[in-house]
Amino acid sequence: MPGATLFFTVRLEERGSTLLADEVARLRLAVAATQRERPFTIDAFVVLPDHLHCVWTLPARDSDYSVRWGAIKSRFTRQLRDGCRVGFNPTEAQRMGKAVGWNPTLRRSRSKIAKGDAGIWQRRFWEHHIRDDADYHAHLSYCWNNPVKHGLVGQPEEWPFSSIHRDRARGQA
């Protein structure tokens, strides 16, 4: 549905990994670049070590969230593969004799290898179309409280990779 509001869960292939939390700056860059290219509103977003949850609202005449997720995943993966660190120039690193690049240790299926898939992300993601105001607020709350549910922090505000900080500043949480 064009203009829909959706809740997403996106997971890494390797459960128990800390890659998303370790590389949250790269993820933020990938999301921001995709958002500039194909606008959408981020209503809530939380990044955990091996998965993320978010609520997006798409533009009025646009329903293509799959292309956006594909772009975010591929941008993030390319940044890892190419050894691009935020604020870090890989060409300069090579000149200085420092290691550049990413050597994945993840096991990849034959089909992922055949498709050139780096094996970082689960191929699919889970989406849910928000039905009404109560559903919307329940999913915002789910995003904010997920780090507590996973035992990462005692209070939602203690988790650094959550839109709760932005939303509390705006008086929305």
Image: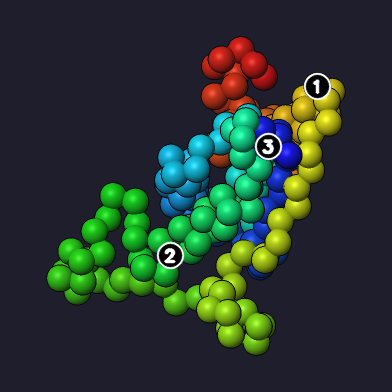
Q: Quadrant of residue 172?
A: top right
- SS assignment at label 1: helix
Q: Is residue 101 left or right of residue 35?
A: left
Q: Tell me the amino acid under the disc marked 3.
A: Pro
Expressed as whole percent of the image width and height from the top left, the position of residue 25 reads 44, 47
Give the residue type at disc 1: Asp
Vertical comparison of 29 with 42: above or below: below
Which numbered dot is residue 78?
Answer: 2
Q: Which residue is mark 1?
A: 133
Q: Amino acid at mark 2?
A: Arg
Contact? badges 1 and 3 (CB < 8 Å): no
Cα–Cα span, label 2 and label 3: 29 Å
Q: Position of residue 62 (x, y in %)?
A: 61, 39
Which percent across, then down, holds residue 22?
A: 50, 54
Q: Nearer the viewer, residue 137 or 143?
A: 137
- Sort mark 2 into few (<14), some (14-19) or many (20+) by Cα contacts within 10 Å: some
**Secondary structure category for the residue under label 2:** helix
Q: CA distance from mark 2 to mark 1?
A: 37 Å
Give the quarter of the image for residue 134: top right
Is 111 on the left or on the right of 37, as rendered?
Answer: right
In this view, the residue in front, 132 or 22, is 132
Q: Is residue 90 above or below residue 107?
A: above
Side of 21 where 90 appears, left or right = left
- Please say if the residues under marks 2 and 1 sit with CB atoms less than 8 Å apart: no
Q: Residue at x 42, y 69 (%)?
A: 81
Q: Can residue 42 be seen? A: no
Residue holding disc 3: 2
Front in this rendered view, residue 16 or 132: 132
C-alpha gap between disc 1 and disc 3 = 18 Å
